[in-house]
Image: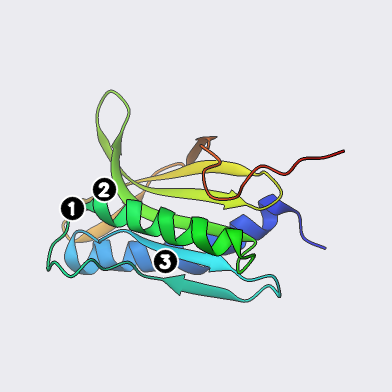
């Protein structure tokens, strides 16, 4: 049986290449999500609010709300939201992946990158504690 960290890593492995491809092809991407169903199936989850170019923060909020609703109905056991950020004092570009698991694992992974002459160059990933916003806290007796 896979650990919560391993199940979240499976989401990253499945859909981080999409962000990298979009960055290489278009230089940007709109936030998107991924989820793992209780049976282990991994799916892509998109958000759309009707606007052609909505702000990223609006799409992230839509994904969070969609994931929270799905978590309450136990449709998913792990979720990921992929979005573009700038990190550090030097404001480097990075793909952020906010990961949450029903068993309380929550982390934000950062995958720095730069695009040089149309080529995506990946930096060393880092991570920080996540906000644990998606899955309601479980009461253990």
Write down the quadrant of residue 16 in the picture: bottom left
Q: Identify the image's colour scheme: rainbow, by chain, secondary structure or one colour.
A: rainbow
- The residue nearer to you, when weighing 6 against 69, is 69
Q: Of the numbered discs in the image, which one, if any, rests on residue 57?
A: 2
At mark 3, the secondary structure is: helix
Which quadrant of the figure contains the C terminus? top right
Image position, residue 67 (x, y; %):
49, 59
Identity of the residue furthest to the top in this view: 89
Q: Determine which residue is flagged by label 1.
A: 55
Image position, residue 41 (x, y; %):
63, 76
**Mark 2 or mark 3: which comes first in sequence?**
3
Q: Determine which residue is flagged by label 3.
A: 17
At mark 1, the secondary structure is: loop
Question: In the displayed structure, would residue 23 be above or below residue 91?
Answer: below
- Report how far apart the C-alphas of labels 1 and 3 lie in the structure: 22 Å
State left or right for residue 45 relative to residue 29.
right
Q: Residue at x 42, y 53 (%)?
A: 64
State left or right for residue 35 relative to residue 91.
right
**Mark 1 or mark 3: which comes first in sequence?**
3
């Amino acid at each position: 049986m896979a650990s919560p960290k391993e199940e979240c890593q499976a989401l990253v492995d499945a859909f981080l290449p999409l962000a990298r491809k979009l960055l290489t092809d278009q230089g940007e991407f709109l936030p998107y999500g991924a989820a793992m169903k209780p049976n282990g199936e991994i799916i892509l989850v998109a958000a759309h609010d009707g606007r052609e170019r909505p702000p990223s923060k609006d799409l992230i909020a839509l994904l969070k709300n969609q994931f929270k609703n799905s978590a309450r109905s136990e449709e998913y056991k792990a979720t990921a939201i992929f979005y573009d950020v700038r990190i550090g004092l030097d404001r480097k570009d990075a793909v952020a992946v906010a990961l949450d698991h029903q068993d309380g694992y929550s982390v934000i992974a950062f995958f720095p990158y730069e695009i040089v002459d149309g080529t995506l160059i990946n930096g060393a990933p880092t991570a920080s504690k996540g906000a644990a916003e998606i899955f309601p806290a479980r009461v253990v007796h």
